[in-house]
Amino acid sequence: MRFAGSALAILALAALPAACSQPRQDIPRAVRVQADGVGPLRLGADLPATALQAKRLDPAALPVGPGCDGRDEFAMHIDLLGEASSIMAMADAEGRIEELIIQPSAKADLRTTDDHACLRLAEAFADRFSEKLGRYTTGSHTQKASTIEQVLSYPGGQRVQARWFRGGGNCDFALRITRHAG
């Protein structure tokens, strides 16, 4: 069977995008939580290099830049252990990751009636990481002028910090993985 010249040209043009496009890089379906980090964001790793790898997980993530405390920072929003989460990685002066903060995205404007309710939510969040980090213990309980703060500590030094703000009942909590736990 012979094709007219125009029909053959149309077929060639239709196949061109598929033939010229770069191969699709598969995005990991599950991000692993480990004692020293999440996915490619690991303590001691080069932040700019691992941020490029992590950007595949959240293409909308901004590049590495100065954070609110002056350290270089990278943040991404991903599904972590079945819940939308925000992950921030901060670097030391040499550009190596020294701290990761993981928070549930859906609980950004959370309000509770008291610090005990806030702690129960933080414990439920901490339970999600116990399989990888071990069973946490309830640590310090600090009353400050405007907050009541509690720490749940894992055996490897990772910790969930919960804060309840007296003025408006705001509750926030985050898993903190730091190079120098404390």
Image (spheres, helix red, strand yellow):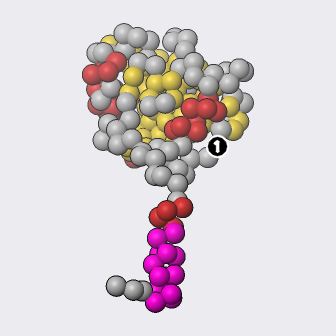
Horizontal and vertical percent position of residue 142: 47, 17
Horizontal and vertical percent position of residue 83: 34, 42
Q: Is residue 56 above or below residue 95?
A: below
Tell me if residue 109 can be seen.
Answer: no
Horizontal and vertical percent position of residue 151: 42, 19
Secondary structure under badge 1? loop
Tell which of 46 and 1 is nearer to you.
1
Q: Is residue 65 left or right of residue 90?
A: right
| Residue on which the image places disc 1 | 63
Number of disc labels: 1
| Image: magenta residue range | 4-16
Horizontal and vertical percent position of residue 41: 51, 29
Amino acid type, mark 1: Pro
Queried whether the magenta region covers residue 142, the answer comes back as no
Queried whether the magenta region covers residue 5, the answer comes back as yes
Within-10-Å neighbours for mark 1: few <14, some 14–19, many 20+: some
Q: Residue at x 67, y 21 (%)?
A: 92
Q: Residue at x 54, y 61 (%)?
A: 20
Q: Is residue 39 above or below residue 34?
A: below
